[in-house]
C-alpha cells in the first residue's frame, strides 16, 4: 500500500463548494471507514484542505479523487499529490 498527502485548493465559487460540502464529507467519511482516508480536513484559513490517503497505487488514488463530489462539481482549483513515506506515527503497525 502507498500513502499520499493531497492538498486541495478551493476554487472561487464558494457558494457551490458549500452546497457540495455535505456530499464531499460523506464521501470522505465512507473512505475513512474503509481505511482509504487516514486523515483529512480543511485548513483554518478557508483556502483548501489536506487529506492523507492509503491506496494500492497512484492509479487507485486518481480514481478516488475523480469520484469525489468536489471534483465532480468542479470546485477545486488545484490538487497537489505527493507520495508520502511515513516513518513515524500511530498509523504504523
Image (cartoon, grey):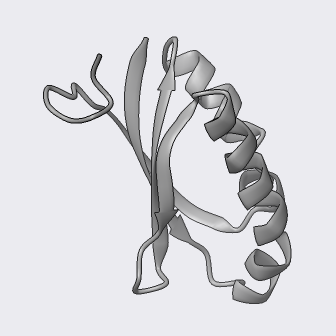
**Relative to residue 14, is residue 83 depicted above or below?**
above
The residue lying at 39 percent from left, 33 percent from top is 4
The residue lying at 85 percent from left, 78 percent from top is 19
Quarter holding the C terminus? top left
The residue lying at 42 percent from left, 74 percent from top is 43
**Relative to residue 20, is residue 82 depicted above or below?**
above
The residue lying at 72 percent from left, 53 percent from top is 71
Q: Quadrant of residue 81?
A: top left
Q: Nearer the viewer, residue 5 or 12?
A: 5
Quarter holding the N terminus? top left
- The picture places residue 27, in percent across and down from the top left corner, at 77, 48
- Most extreme residue toward the left is 87
Q: How many marks?
A: 0
For the question of whether residue 29 can be seen, the reply is yes
**Relative to residue 24, is residue 48 depicted above or below?**
below
Q: Quadrant of residue 73?
A: bottom right
- The picture places residue 79, in percent across and down from the top left corner, at 49, 52
- The picture places residue 21, in percent across and down from the top left corner, at 76, 70
**Residue 33 in the figure: left or right of residue 90:** right
For the question of whether residue 79 can be seen, the reply is no
- The picture places residue 78, in percent across and down from the top left corner, at 51, 59
Amino acid at each position: 500500500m502507498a500513502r499520499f498527502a493531497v492538498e486541495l485548493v478551493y476554487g472561487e465559487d464558494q457558494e457551490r463548494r458549500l452546497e457540495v460540502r455535505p456530499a464531499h464529507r460523506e464521501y470522505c467519511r465512507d473512505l475513512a471507514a474503509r481505511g482509504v482516508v487516514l486523515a483529512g480536513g480543511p485548513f483554518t484559513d478557508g483556502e483548501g484542505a489536506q487529506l492523507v490517503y492509503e491506496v494500492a497505487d497512484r492509479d487507485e488514488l486518481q480514481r478516488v479523487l475523480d469520484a469525489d463530489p468536489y471534483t465532480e462539481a468542479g470546485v477545486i482549483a488545484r490538487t497537489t499529490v505527493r507520495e508520502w513515506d511515513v516513518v513515524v506515527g500511530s498509523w504504523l503497525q
